[in-house]
Amino acid sequence: MSVGDEVRTVEPPSQQSLGTAAARNLATTTKSAPQMQEITSRWLLRMLPWVQVQGGTYRVNRRLSYSVGDGRVTFVQTGDRVAVIPAELGELPALRDFEDEEVLAELANRCEQQEFAPGQTVAAAGGPADRVYLLAHGKVEKVGEGPYGDETVLEVLADGVYFGDQALVDDEATWQYTARAATACTVLVLTRQDVLNLAERAQSLRGHLDALASIPAQRTNKYGEAAIELSAGHVGEAVVPHTFVDYEGAPREYELSVAQTVLKVHSRVADLYNQPMNQTEQQLRLTVEALRERQEHELVNNREFGLLNNCDYGQRLQPHDGAPTPDDMDELLSRRRGSKMFLAHPRAIAAFGRECNKRGLNPATVEVGGHHVPAWRGVPIFPCNKIPVSDARTTSIICMRTGESEQGVIGLQQSGIPDEIEPSMSVRFMGIDEQAIISYLVTAYYSAAILVPDALGVLENVEVSRWR
């Protein structure tokens, strides 16, 4: 531009039509219903068979069993020192029902802490079994001899397990397998000699051990149940054995648990703001969804009836290599007949998929309710984000047989309760207070029962962050 040229400004054209901002004042907005990210597929609630519990309590009658002391031991850690909680020693068969707290505390003090490096032998097959090992941390492999003389891993043990407990009751016991550390392990060792030395001074312990030795061995089947005497293959006039089926004297009872909340809605909101959606209905819908999410969480994690906490210790497995492999899933399936479903955290399902990819396997899918669900050996693997993932990025995979007729896992509920809106869920009007706030009590009743121990199995300590 040269000096003297005139600078011209271009005026914007005047508005020729109605703007969108003003037009929206006359328009009707299309709205969605309130959304909620917490809502999940809740496959456990959908697939679990629900049994009507009319009296609020479900009693599981079982055949009499003599198996005792098959639990796990709990420890406390202070720095690098580990100690067993004295009362937890009652999980050992030889100390079952022994209640002298002072003696148990003395036995706990006599437990010696030992560290084992990966690959180090903890106990050698054929050697004298004169001590019990309490595994505080790490993994131990039970190694035996295969059918052709080769070495084979019989089982993998992990935190909280004890082994060698026969040493406390049998002075001639020997190790039937080799216990070898698969990872760095911390164990507490209690010797038979320490127990006998203490029994010389503690009459309560001496009396307990003598009473234990005087109990005759009970005939049981491989599940620990009282044997039913039978005769087969005989000829002639053989004497047919007499028998009866004994039951547990104190069967377990499951009471329906409860999840509740009080929903509050101001009367002005309930009266005036109901178009195009009813405010009370939307508030109630999302509250019910939250209760159902909590119900599934409790069915998995509750200490009294949750699946993870009530799985029999004999049905808890450890992965052989950390990540969930097809071999581990096969082992989990083999522990029960008629498995109906796996339940796993989505990250565990992804970890299993990576292990299948490494082996060139492509797991099939099955159709369930119009959804294609991944499966292994024809058993669907349902996702469940209620199964926790620990800070160490480990989780669990559940496998179960379901149904009352199959002696499996069942859900418990009571339908037909007052003011019911869904089976075993009610909404009860509680009144309007002096601040014109309407209150509704929203309640869900539920529980779960494992009819026989082998109906449920858990693959524990599954690593979900291994990518190599």
Image (spheres, helix red, strand yellow):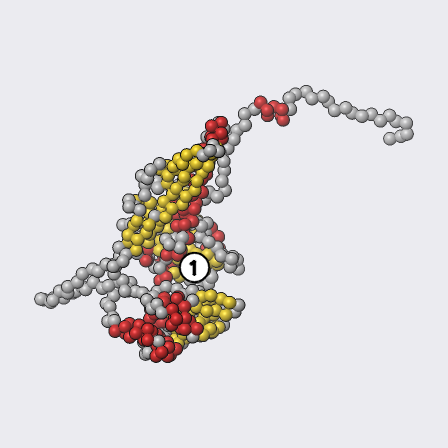
Instruction: Examine the image and state in which quarter residue 415 appears.
Output: top left
Where does the image place residue 157, in percent across and percent down from the top left? Answer: 41, 66
Quarter location, residue 288: top left
Residue in the foreground of this view, choosing between 134 and 232: 134
Determine if residue 231 is in view: yes
Most distant residue in the top direction: 16
Does residue 280 lie above or below 374 as drawn? above
The residue positioned farthest toward the front in the image shown: 434
Badge 1 amino acid: Glu
Q: Where residue 323 sits: x, y (%)? A: 47, 59
Residue at the image position 33 percent from the left and 45 percent from the top = 413
Which residue is at a point 30% across and 65% down the rendered structure image? 67
446 vs 25, left or right, is left
Residue 240 % position (x, y)? 13, 64
Using the image as rendered, state which of residue 78 and residue 379 is in the foreground.
78
Q: Find the residue positioned furthest to the left.
A: 237
The image shows residue 432, relative to residue 48, as above or below, that is: above
Q: Is residue 142 visible?
A: no
- Location of residue 178 by image quarter: bottom left
Which residue is rendered at x = 28% and y = 52% of the image?
A: 59
Residue shown at 33% from the left, 73% from the top: 204
**Which SS class for mark 1?**
strand
Looking at the image, how many numbered discs can be counted on the residues? 1
Viewer-side residue, 375 vs 72: 72
Instruction: Kindly identify which residue carries mark 1.
Output: 460
Specify few, some or many for label 1: CA neighbours under 10 Å numbering under 14, 14-19, or 20 or more.
some
Residue 232 in the image: x percent, y percent?
17, 64
Quadrant into which the N terminus falls:
top right
